[in-house]
Amino acid sequence: MTTQYNQLTLDRVQEGQPIPEFAYDVTATTVVLGAMASRDFRPMHHDKDFAVDRNGVQDIFLNTPNQAAWFERYLTDWTGPKGRLGRIQFRMKNSVFPGDTMTFKGQVEKVSTDAKGCGWADVSVNLSVGERTVTDCTARIALPTDATDNPWKRRGENWKP
Amino acid sequence: MADELPEDVQSWIGKECYHEEGEFPVEQGYIWTTCSSVENGNPIFWDEEVAEEITDGPIAMPTMISVWFRPHLWAPNRTKQAQPLQVHFDLKESLGLPEAVMTDNTIVFGEPVRPGDRLKTCQILHSVSGPKTTKLGTGRFWEIEVRYTNQNDELVGAEHYTGFGYKRGE
């Protein structure tokens, strides 16, 4: 049976609109699984002694590609499967360690349609642990302009992220 | 730390280098493992019918773009450990900066990446800063671009990294 899904369309999005908050309790397994899934074998993502002694931090920490995957998951949970990431930028200010609860909070910054008719939501996302901002992220994600549109069908000149 | 960059580092700036092919084709198992690692239930990755309807078949999570170029930690006849983002490690070595972290990352996504794709990549060093001191130590920031294309020479993505190589403070 085909999975049923909800799909956000561009007409239901406006500037300033919040993206539902998402929180997740991070464990050592979260960090190590994320590093191994992204084939990141560097020891600061699985070896606490190395992270403490060489990197000067308190524990192993989430690696960059896995943080990107968490941001993607957060955004497409909001948009539904036809949401297509065009661009993502993030600045890491701190790290996420085992024992942290990481919280994603986002907001729509801009809604637009480009010259090729592709609908876009520019969003900002803050990843924090308690009061500590870990990563600031901005992203540009394509949304269907109506129920019949699908950004994933865009190719070549029709896809300008 | 001297302000001036070593000649070898200066000569790398703006040049494409490390043209490489991925060591293995894009693999469905890694896609599921990565989705699982972030509990991503997006049906385009899990449901063939949805994938067919929306993305014309299975695709990888777009943010997995760098995964396909992280080399095996060990491989037969390899005498030196291969590193992803080799320019980053070349900079650490040439500048004598033993530690490094990534601070900024921008990814622009092109054609979807699909299981079975054979991807190619190249790296470009765009800039290296003068000496800077942060809470981690004293070192330099650098900007690296990594471009990814598929077997049809279509751009599937481009990543821009900012790294900070440093010596820890006393």
Image (cartoon, coloured by chain):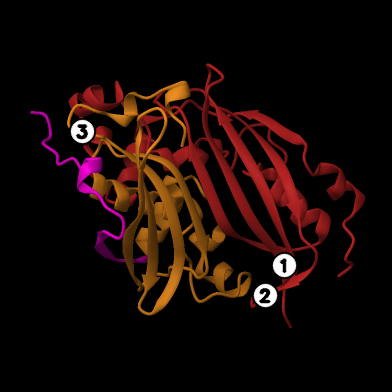
Chain colours: A orange, B red
Identify the mark at residue B166; answer none if there is no mark: 1
Dots 1, 2 in contact, CB < 8 A = yes
User: Could you say which is closer to the camera, residue B64 or residue A132?
Assistant: A132
Q: Quadrant of the N terminus of chain A?
A: top left
Label 2 packing within 10 angstroms: few (<14), some (14-19), many (20+): few
Instruction: List x then y, in percent, for residue A108.
Output: 33, 55
Q: Residue at x 76, y 49 (%)?
A: B90
Residue labelled with disc 2: B134
Dots 3, 2 in contact, CB < 8 A = no
Instruction: List x then y, in percent, for residue B149.
Output: 55, 26
Label 3 packing within 10 angstroms: few (<14), some (14-19), many (20+): some
What subunit carries mark 3? Answer: A
Q: Check disc 1 and give the amino acid type.
A: Tyr
User: Could you give the CA–CA distance between mark 3 and mark 2, rounded to whole angstroms?
Assistant: 48 Å
Q: Check disc 3 and give the amino acid type.
A: Asp
Instruction: List x then y, in percent, for residue A149.
Output: 24, 28
Asked if marks 3 and 2 fall on the same chain, the answer is: no
Q: Check disc 2 and give the amino acid type.
A: Thr
